[in-house]
Image (cartoon, rainbow, N blue to C red):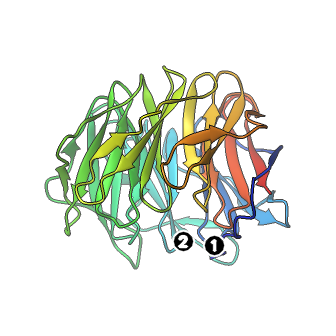
Amino acid sequence: METPEKDTGQPVVSGPVRFPVGEHPIAVAVAPSGEFVYVADWGAHTVSAFRVEGSDGALTPLAGSPFATGEWPHSITFAPSGAFLYTANGLSNDVSVFGVDPRTGGLTPVTGSPFAANNHPEAVVLSPSGAFAYVANGFSHDISAYRVDPATGALAELPGSPFACGEKPLALVIEPSERFLYVANRRFDVWGYHIDSDGGLRHLEGSPFAAGRGPTAITIDPTGRFVYVANFRSDAVGAYRIDPASGALRQLDDSPFPTGSIPVGVTTDALGKLVFVTNGQDDTLSVYRIDEASGSLTPLATSPLAAGRMPCGIAAHPNGRFIYVTNWVSNDVAVYRIE
């Protein structure tokens, strides 16, 4: 795995350079090794796969790409080891699991894939240890929880699963110590859970936590101190501090922070210095500097940056130099370089 480069001062984000993918790309994931990038093509029911080339983060399609998934893949993520790739498939109500060839990046479905989820899975995330997987089911308003076989990547649903959550859960995130899970519910709020040693979920005290209108995406900075939520109906990103003992979220005093129109994706860079927000209606990417002490956000002077048509999914490269964004209408994935 590549090591993020040290911060050298005020960053400059440049781009985009765009590469064609399948119909309606909705999500993107970068392999933990940094060698490969994968895009969930919602409209094509496929994953487009690329090798990262050179010093500019450019993408070269892999042999055999695109690879078939279930119907309407909404979300895509890796096992921490990089050995397995997962997609949450909204229309077929399941999760596709692929073995990843470490040399070529090619994908092969694992035995038993796809694995059943509940009604309309929107997002999938694995715990930092790789022991558990969680799926947000948008229409049944719950979270499916699974134990992950470390040898095969296969999923086995946990006792007590699915676990109730708010209305229309769209995104999940787990803080780095693997104690807490948070889910953004599109209707109103963010729910928080304590992750038990067996992978089960228990509601945090004070949960649910207030959000803006239409929370659609959620991320945690690499230090595990701050949570950021994109609220697409209020054109803002909310910022929270995590109580390290209880996991409760406290919204920062100066939160929320204005974005472009219809923010639908959010992530931090690998160094935890920047927050990126995709703005689906005005075709831009907002970029903010994170205050290391408070977690507050300050837009870069060059923000927002141009994107393709209707940017949505977003992922950071582990070396801290590149950000990848999927553009739903222009059917491409864009790379931005962080200097």
Asked if residue 319 lies left or right of residue 130, the reply is right
Asked if residue 138 lies left or right of residue 157, the reply is right
Residue pictured at 76% horizontal, 33% vertical:
308
Residue pictured at 73% horizontal, 28% vertical:
309
Specify whether residue 117 is in view: yes
Closer to the camera, 278 or 125?
278
Mark 2, residue position:
82
Q: Is residue 161 above or below residue 156?
A: above
- What amino acid type should be assigned to the residue bearing mark 1? Ser
Mark 1 vs mark 2: give the one in front.
1
Q: Residue furthest left?
A: 160
| Marker disc for residue 33 | 1
Give the Cα distance between marks 1 and 2: 7 Å
Q: Secondary structure at mark 1?
A: loop
| Marker disc for residue 291 | none
Residue pictured at 76% horizontal, 37% vertical:
301
Q: Looking at the image, do the residues carrying marks 1 and 2 touch, with CB atoms under 8 Å apart? A: yes
Closer to the camera, 66 or 265?
265
Percent position of residue 264, x then y: 55, 32
Q: Secondary structure at mark 2?
A: loop
Closer to the camera, 54 or 85?
54
Dividing the picture into quadrants, the one containing residue 3 is: bottom right
- What amino acid type should be assigned to the residue bearing mark 2? Gly
Percent position of residue 337, x then y: 79, 53
Label 2 Cα neighbours within 10 Å, binned few <14 / some 14-19 / many ≥20 = some
Mark sitting earlier along the chain (1/2): 1
Residue pictured at 53% horizontal, 27% vertical:
236
Image quarter where the C terminus lies is bottom right
Percent position of residue 229, x then y: 46, 38
Q: Is residue 169 above or below residue 95?
A: above
Percent position of residue 328, x then y: 66, 32
